[in-house]
Image (cartoon, rainbow, N blue to C red):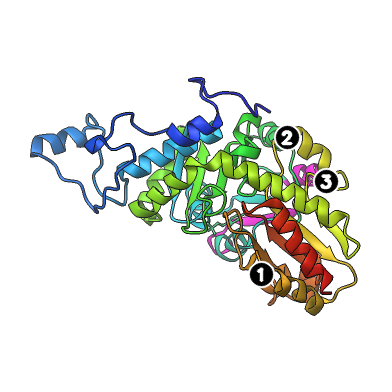
Amino acid sequence: MSRSTPSPNGEHFSTLAVHAGEARQKPGDSITDPIFCTSTFTFESTASLLEFIEKKLPREEYGRYGNPIEKTVEKKLAALDGGEDAILFSTGMAAIVGLLTAKLNSGDEIIFFDECYHRSREFCVKHLGRFGVTTHQVKTGDYDAMERAINSKTKLIVSESPTNPHLSVIDCERFAALGKKHGVETLIDATLATPYNIRPLNCGVDYVWHSATKYLAGHNDLLAGVLVGSREKLDPIRKLRGILGSINSPHNIYLLIRGLKTFELRMERHNQNGLAVAQFLAAHPKIEKVYYPGLETHPYYDVARRTMRGFGGLVTFNVRGADWKQTARVIDAVKIPRIGPSLGGVESLIEQPLVMSYFDYSPEDRKRFGIDDNMIRMSCGIENTQDLLDDLAQALAQL
Ligand SMILES: *Cc1c(COP(=O)(O)O)cnc(C)c1O
């Protein structure tokens, strides 16, 4: 793990978050990147158009293929993950859909660890299935089962790390080695970890995927997604994005760049709040179980300690002896976290996975996906740590 390794130019994480990808001197001598609010880009003459077509002139052409501010944020995001290139998409889901549709053909197979973002699973099973792609799922963390599921048709193996909402942590080196051994590409959804807490490319993973909607943007005010990897591997995906049109608006990209400036500062507080909330809940008599990779009792604590710089702001816990309605009372009693899906923003959020994401699932499916009636997921924002603990204490006292 090269957690504090500087970039090839010697800059450290926060310096990259502030400066990477940006020109030193910008249009209008502005310190911030300008928003080019334009759908198209014009050519001075037929000669300059021909020069562009013959690839002699690096510049923009039409908004669906790129915008200067998009190039800036892509370079910044690539630098943060230690990757050669990055592609920005309109949402996290648009990014994974772009990758899967660019890379897979009819007859191909993919394998997921089973704790994965429910919409990626849905896209693969319901939609890629219609195009002749087969999806397999194996138990999270069972590398032998993953290896047994690999065959000559397997093109990609996918894992989240940490997973949501159980916060299981994948050993990226082992995962990457498994792919390399069988000539299969590897993808990690590192949304919950962010490049601050893990660097899967350094472990040899081929693609890192983030929902930039979460910690990277960090302010609950936009949606975006990003894929990071080698230019060669990303190139076909970039070309397909130009056709799909799953791009972000220049205004949104400006907000993403602005959010990234404070990325390291925010992550430090998210990590601190996550750990403090997890430790507080683990010691609370009304709490039956806490899922947090920074707790020694967590089944993946050793992997997490070895591979993560911090453990993030997401904490999942079960309320002792509560049915789903009693659990909802805790959600309704907190005063700081708002009730809502999503995570990774400066504002804390709280939700009951059963109600928020799995209400229309059968009890058997919920059990299969490990969603308990008394489970709560809290995304710790960057509020004062003690205020969050006091709020949880008063909410639990009402049970
Ligand atoms: C939110 C999320 C996604 C999807 O990203 P969007 O930006 O909402 O499309 C994928 N994976 C994880 C782990 C997420 O939390």
Q: Are marks 1 and 3 in contact (CB under 8 Å)?
A: no
Residue bounds of the magenta highlight? 129-149
**Up/down of 305 relative to 217, above or below:** above
Q: Residue 95 at what x, y percent from top left?
A: 49, 51
Disc number for residue 295: 3
The residue at 87%/59% (across/down) is 284
**Left or right position of 183 against 221:** right
Chain-order first, disc 3 or disc 2: 3
Would you say residue 134 sits in the magenta stretch? yes
**Separation of disc 1 and disc 3 at Cα?**
26 Å
Ligand 1: image quarter: bottom right
**Separation of disc 3 and disc 2 at Cα?**
14 Å
Q: Are marks 2 and 1 in contact (CB under 8 Å)?
A: no
Q: Quadrant of the C terminus?
A: bottom right
SS class of the residue under badge 3? loop
Disc 2 designates what residue? 307
Q: Residue 299 at what x, y percent from top left?
A: 85, 47
**Up/down of 364 relative to 205, above or below:** below
**Left or right position of 262 against 379:** left
**Up/down of 16 relative to 351, above or below:** above
Work out whether residue 43 or residue 281 is closer to the camera in this orientation and state it: 281
Task: Confirm if mark 1 falls within 8 A of ligand 1.
Answer: no
**Separation of disc 2 and disc 1 at Cα?**
29 Å
SS class of the residue under badge 2? helix
Disc 1 designates what residue? 357
Would you say residue 267 sits in the magenta stretch? no
Badge 1 amino acid = Ser
